[in-house]
Amino acid sequence: MDSIIKVKLLVDEKIVIETLNRIGIAHEKSRILYPSCILYKSENLDYYIMHFKQYYYLVKNGYDNITGTDITRRNAIIWNLCNWKLITCDMTLITEHNIFVYVLPFKEKRNWIIKSKVNHKYD
């Protein structure tokens, strides 16, 4: 399995969580969004951004079918979060990509159904 990416938050973690909840695979016709990544806080309070399949593999020993496309999408999402100054990380771990990631604008969120694959409590 590809390694997870350790990040440092530059804003409150709730902002990063909310933003990640609006980035992923979108079905525009049905207005359903499937977020791709989560923010994970380890027991030693380090933060990581990982694809939901990485989370399930790490925490629940499942989803051993992560693909290169999944990792590329995760990297694109991390690159965006860094570019938006929400997080920082070792950018040498982020490979080049040309993948499109859907970002649901905050003002459109109420018009969409967000179906997260992870029911992860952050409080």
Image (cartoon, rainbow, N blue to C red):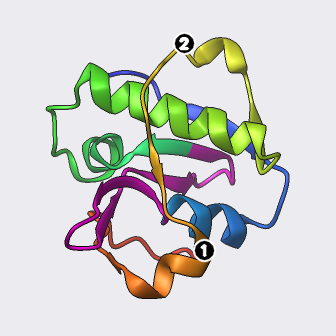
Q: Nearer the viewer, residue 119 or 59?
A: 119
Percent from the top left, x then y, of residue 113?
31, 80
Which three-letter amino acid code belongs to the residue tagged 1?
Phe
Residue 5 picture quarter: top right
Label 2: how many Cα within 10 Å (few below 14, some 14–19, many 20+): few
In three-dimensional space, the C-alpha distance between marks 2 and 1, rounded to whole angstroms, equals 27 Å
Residue 30 to residue 82: above or below: below
Q: Nearer the viewer, mark 2 or mark 1?
A: 1
Where, quadrant-wise, is the N terminus in this rendering?
top left
Whether residue 123 appears in this view of the structure is no
Question: How crowded is the residue under tag 1: few (<14 C-alpha within 10 Å), some, or many (20+)?
Answer: few
Image position of 87 (left or right of 47): right
- Indicate whether 110 appears above or below 97: below
- Residue lying at the far bottom in this picture: please name it: 110
Instruction: Give the secondary structure at mark 1.
Output: helix
Residue at the location (33% across, 73% down)?
119
